[in-house]
């Protein structure tokens, strides 16, 4: 046995432990969703059942929470993607001396515990909406959750968009300007299409981060509820296999999504490889 | 008075920068020949200024500043706010240090002090554990594995993270419960005769925190290591460096920004974590965010909650600064 095989074996063992740690608890939770025992456990199996899925679907709080989560998620996408876009463009144009302060302010929500963002949002908007007489319109859980979550999710989008913006070829912009385009035209016809993939992934990440946020939301949501705060309430009261059933549903949705994504990506890559080969062939002929 | 000052401060700062910009333009040092509005057009300029202004002022700066000033006010009934009782005070910070004061002797607030220290220490430990757990996999993904494998493993890493934090805590609770599968295995195999209360021993808390933020550590590390040229490792190996020296002298110095980024995020998230301590913490463990939570939802003492939140924020800022200093990286490098 040489050192290479030992290294290989060690690596395999490590990967096994790592992914075991990652998936083990989820698998046990998934198994407990099908066990009729009302205390969630994977073993011993009392009898196999699907009743916990039914309990879940008929839970009114959960469904209400789900509805609110979706509304808030859409709201957060609508706020944070445009704000992130504006923030990243502003970064390139802002007065140079103010840039470091601007950067500090925009990324600070990423480095601040979510609990603090939730608290500060509630405290500020309670007084501010009172002061401006807009309390009946603004001071409610859904608006505050959107505002609180967007403060850091906008920063995520800004960082995603900035990463792509740094690869933007300034020569394209100059070419367009030389050909008589105005700056706004460059923005709409060159910059925005170039940033489209980043905007899309920012939107997806914004929705997901919003959907599963707990720390900020639990403060900002006030008397309303989202799916995550409902789940938290249930876990606090005690455990029920209906939550395992929810976990199973989420895992299944994720799996389907991941497989679809992988499939699409492979097909796209195959198509672009095909195109490249054809172009290469055409070039060789010509 | 202090409330008005919160609104005045951003105005002063913006005015100061505006003045400086004007001054530079007047001195002819401004390289941009066109003004902001000329450059972007009216519609785009308005969008940029409104979006960025609303975000930086109304969603970030003002709420933080407002919370800060609120923590220096006493907790009052709404009718007393702005009245003669509404003075600036340090009482909430004094409460953190001294607790309830009795007239006869000076006492200290050991409960909250201990919770603070425990929170910081456990978060540090979790950061260290996660670094140790994730460094090998990040290195493997970034330097060793084939492209096909990287994609498969990345997918496998991301999958569990779509299940939200609370359900993951719940999954650990099923695993660790005294009637849970782990205890059954331990008893069946004869390793223990009575069920072990993992949750009371805080094993659940440590696992929950480390489990929740595993991926937050893997990705920055991966990004940090991935751009390292494989030839550098080859060269070090050819020159006879043992494997641990390759990591210590080649890989880790190169991946500093990634390490700093992963450590900062994991520390911040676990120090500010609410779910894991609430659902997996032992009955005798008081997490700092749980105290803040109780001030808000049980005693409705928002001012004191703000003061405590600020103390937590301060701890996080200190940690970020120490990391930046120790790794000699800039803020821009770790938020990438």
Image (cartoon, rainbow, N blue to C red):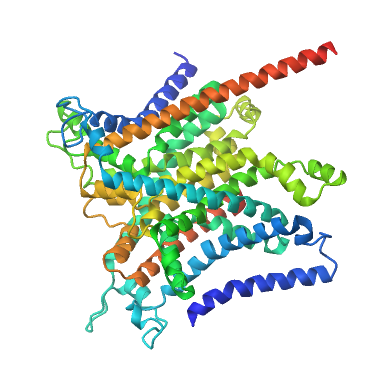
Q: Position of residue A124 (x, y in %)?
A: 45, 68
Is A125 above or below relative to A218? below
Q: Quadrant of residue B78?
A: bottom left
The answer to whether residue A188 is seen in the rendering is yes
Q: What residue is shown at x 52% (from left), y 74% (from top)?
A: B6
- A245 vs A199, left or right, is left
Picture quadrant of residue B226: top right
- Left or right: residue B41 versus residue B137 is right
**Numbered-mark total:** 0
- Seen in the picture, residue B73 relative to A166 is either above or below; the reply is below
Residue A83: percent from left, percent from top: 59, 53
For image coordinates 25% across by 35% down, the residue present is: B175
Image spot of residue A233 (x, y percent) = 27, 50
Most distant residue in the bottom direction: B84
- Residue B110: percent from left, percent from top: 27, 67
**In this rendering, would B275 be left or right of B37?**
left
| Closer to us: A213 or A225 | A225
Quarter occupied by the C terminus of chain A: top right
Identified at 41% across, 67% down, the residue is A136
Query: Between residues B156 and A93, which one lies in front from this camera angle?
Result: A93
């Amino acid at each position: 046995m040489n050192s290479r095989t030992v290294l290989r074996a060690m690596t395999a063992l490590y990967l096994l432990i790592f992914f075991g740690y990652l998936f083990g608890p989820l698998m046990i939770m998934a198994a407990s969703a099908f066990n009729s025992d009302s205390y969630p456990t994977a073993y011993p199996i009392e009898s196999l059942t699907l009743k916990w899925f039914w309990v879940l679907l008929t839970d009114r709080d959960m469904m209400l929470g789900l509805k609110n989560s979706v509304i808030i998620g859409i709201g957060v996408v609508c706020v944070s993607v445009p704000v992130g876009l504006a923030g990243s463009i502003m970064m390139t144009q802002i007065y140079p001396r103010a840039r470091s302060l601007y950067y500090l302010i925009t990324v600070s929500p990423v480095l601040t515990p979510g609990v603090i963002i939730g608290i500060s949002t509630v405290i500020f908007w309670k007084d501010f909406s009172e002061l401006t007489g807009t309390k009946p319109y603004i001071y409610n859980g859904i608006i505050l959750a959107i505002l609180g979550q967007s403060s850091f999710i906008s920063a995520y989008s800004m960082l995603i968009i900035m990463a792509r913006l740094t690869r933007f070829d300034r020569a394209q912009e100059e070419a367009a300007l030389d050909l008589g385009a105005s700056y706004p035209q460059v923005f709409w016809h060159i910059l925005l299409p170039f940033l489209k993939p980043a905007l899309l992934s920012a939107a997806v990440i914004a929705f997901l981060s919003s959907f599963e946020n707990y720390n900020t939301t639990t403060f900002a949501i006030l008397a309303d509820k989202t799916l995550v705060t409902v789940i938290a309430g249930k876990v606090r009261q005690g455990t029920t296999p209906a939550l395992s059933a929810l976990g199973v549903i989420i895992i299944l949705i994720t799996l389907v999504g991941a497989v679809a994504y992988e499939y699409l990506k492979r097909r796209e890559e195959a198509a672009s490889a095909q195109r490249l080969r054809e172009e290469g062939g055409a070039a060789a002929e010509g | 008075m202090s409330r008005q000052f919160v609104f005045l401060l951003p105005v002063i700062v913006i005015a100061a920068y505006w003045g400086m910009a004007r001054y530079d333009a007047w001195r002819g040092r401004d390289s941009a020949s066109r003004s902001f509005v000329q450059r972007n057009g009216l519609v785009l300029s308005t969008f940029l200024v409104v979006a960025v202004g609303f975000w930086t002022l109304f969603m970030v700066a003002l709420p933080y500043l407002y919370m800060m000033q609120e923590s220096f006010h006493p907790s009052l009934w709404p009718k007393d706010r702005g009245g003669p009782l509404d003075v600036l005070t340090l009482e909430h910070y004094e409460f953190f240090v001294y607790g309830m004061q009795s007239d006869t002797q000076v006492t200290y607030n050991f409960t909250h002090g201990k919770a603070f220290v425990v929170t910081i220490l456990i978060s540090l430990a979790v950061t260290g554990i996660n670094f140790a757990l994730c460094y090998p996999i990040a290195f493997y993904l970034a330097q060793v594995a084939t492209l096909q494998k990287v994609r498969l493993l990345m997918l496998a890493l991301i999958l569990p993270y779509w299940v939200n934090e609370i359900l993951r805590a719940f999954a650990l609770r099923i695993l660790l419960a005294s009637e849970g599968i782990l205890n059954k295995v331990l008893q069946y195999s004869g390793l223990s005769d009575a069920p072990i209360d993992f949750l009371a021993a805080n094993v659940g808390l440590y696992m929950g925190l480390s489990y929740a933020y595993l991926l937050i550590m893997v990705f920055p590390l991966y990004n940090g290591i991935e751009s390292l040229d494989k030839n550098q490792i080859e060269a070090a190996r050819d020159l006879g460096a043992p494997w641990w020296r390759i990591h210590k002298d080649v890989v880790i110095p190169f991946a500093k920004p990634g390490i700093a980024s992963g450590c900062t995020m994991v520390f911040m998230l676990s120090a500010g974590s609410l779910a894991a301590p609430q659902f997996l913490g032992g009955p005798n463990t008081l997490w700092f965010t749980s105290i803040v939570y109780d001030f808000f939802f049980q005693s409705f003492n928002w001012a004191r909650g703000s003061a405590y939140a600020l103390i937590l924020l301060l701890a996080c800022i200190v940690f970020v600064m120490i990391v930046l200093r120790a790794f000699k990286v800039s803020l821009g490098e770790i938020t990438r």
